[in-house]
């Protein structure tokens, strides 16, 4: 009896995930078609490239955030890590450090911040909300102290040019999404570590009794989230050509919104890589279309909030029907 029930439940969950992803794709296509009709400027090559660049950074943040939310946690610091990373990479490049070394150091810095979050959760018993909120405010302050509240100009032409160029007609920043998303998909959906993350989010005690190292998975989840934020920080510094601790303000909320809209459950144990990607570009499309139509930016926030309420409501209905 057990051997029949488990495959059936797994098949049902996969079917639901497929249908949900299909619905998100349909919504994104519908938005694009509607905006193409509403304004002739939407479907132009320059605007599509700009849209891909806008959505790319939030998409990578959303992937990292998804790892954490699957464990039933939250990372409120990713926006601050983005801003702090722009300062770190800009400072290193300005001081004469080779670009590739500056990038590696910045990414390692992000990883260490994530490990610090995990340490606070695992060893100090702090709630994820508290430890990441503390880091959010602290990193802003540290970054502002490092720069005296000003910006650091990046004069390396090659570093700045990367974010403005395209490959095969696709912006380089979007290629970065693919570079991050492919290994993230393999890790989450095709490896035992991904199964362990879902197990921790579903029931940490049951996961521990099954032989899963819950603390290790917490370290991995928060380390990956912070590293994704550091990657975005490097991308943003390259795009704007400056390092500024105030950059990325509020991006943590956009990352969480993209992840939730993409089907990640705030209760843990449910999520994917492709869902948050689609969610991020849905939000980017709404923002882009609203700007082209001269719609008040406040409406963008209202629409995003409404989408979150609807998605979480249906997620609760799905959980109750189990």
Image (cartoon, rainbow, N blue to C red):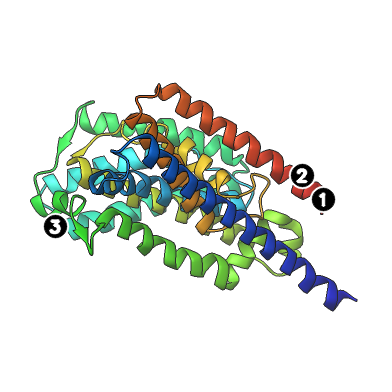
Residue drawn at x 41%, y 37% as measured from the top left: 251
Q: Nearer the viewer, mark 3 or mark 2?
A: 2
Badge 1 marks a residue whose secondary structure is loop
Quarter of the image containing the C terminus? bottom right
Up-down relation of residue 29 to residue 209 (above or below): above
The circle on residue 94 is none
Badge 3 marks a residue whose secondary structure is loop
Task: Name the quadrant containing residue 211.
Answer: bottom right
Q: Which residue bears the numbered disc 2?
A: 317
Residue drawn at x 52%, y 26% as measured from the top left: 302
- Residue 74 or 127: which is nearer the viewer? 74
Separation of residues labelled 3 and 2 (CA atoms): 53 Å
Residue drawn at x 27%, y 43% as measured from the top left: 47
Residue 34 x %, y %: 44, 40
Q: Which residue bears the numbered disc 3?
A: 98
Residue 222 x %, y %: 50, 52
Q: Nearer the viewer, mark 1 or mark 3?
A: 1
Up-down relation of residue 165 to residue 150 (above or below): below
Residue drawn at x 40%, y 24% as measured from the top left: 297
Separation of residues labelled 1 and 3 (CA atoms): 55 Å
Furthest residue in direction front, as rendered: 37
- Residue 190 or 122: which is nearer the viewer? 190
Residue 180 x %, y %: 39, 61
Q: Which residue bears the numbered disc 1?
A: 321
Label pair 1/2, CB-CB below 8 angstroms: yes
Separation of residues labelled 1 and 2 (CA atoms): 6 Å
Q: Residues within 10 Å of mark 2 (few under 14, many from 20)?
A: few
Determine if residue 305 is in view.
Answer: yes
Badge 2 marks a residue whose secondary structure is helix
């Amino acid at each position: 009896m057990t051997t029949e029930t488990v495959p059936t439940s797994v098949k049902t969950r996969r079917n639901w995930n497929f249908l949900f992803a299909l619905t998100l794709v349909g919504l994104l296509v519908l938005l694009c078609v509607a905006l193409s009709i509403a304004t002739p400027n939407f479907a132009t090559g320059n605007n599509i490239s700009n849209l891909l660049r806008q959505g790319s950074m939030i998409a990578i943040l959303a992937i990292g955030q998804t790892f954490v939310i699957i464990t039933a946690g939250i990372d409120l610091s990713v926006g601050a890590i983005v801003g702090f990373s722009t300062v770190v990479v800009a400072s290193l490049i300005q001081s004469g450090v080779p670009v590739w070394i500056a990038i590696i150091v910045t990414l390692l810095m992000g990883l260490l911040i994530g490990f610090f979050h995990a340490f606070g959760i695992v060893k100090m018993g702090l709630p994820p909300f508290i430890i990441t909120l503390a880091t959010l405010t602290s990193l802003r302050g540290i970054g502002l102290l490092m720069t005296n509240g000003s910006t650091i100009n990046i004069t390396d032409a090659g570093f700045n040019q990367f974010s403005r160029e395209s490959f095969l007609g696709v912006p380089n920043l979007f290629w970065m999404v693919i570079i991050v998303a492919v290994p993230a998909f393999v890790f989450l959906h095709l490896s035992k570590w991904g199964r362990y993350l879902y197990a921790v989010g579903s029931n940490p005690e049951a996961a521990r009794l099954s032989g899963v190292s819950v603390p290790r998975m917490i370290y991995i989840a928060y380390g990956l989230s912070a590293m994704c934020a550091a990657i975005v920080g490097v991308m943003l510094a390259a795009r704007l050509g400056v390092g500024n601790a105030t950059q990325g303000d509020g991006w943590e909320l956009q990352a969480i919104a993209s992840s939730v809209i993409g089907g990640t459950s705030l209760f843990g144990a449910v999520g994917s890589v492709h869902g948050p990607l689609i969610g991020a570009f849905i939000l980017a499309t709404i923002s882009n279309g609203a700007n082209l139509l001269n719609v008040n930016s406040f409406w963008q926030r209202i629409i995003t909030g409404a989408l979150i309420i609807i998605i979480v409501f249906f997620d609760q209905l799905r959980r109750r029907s189990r």
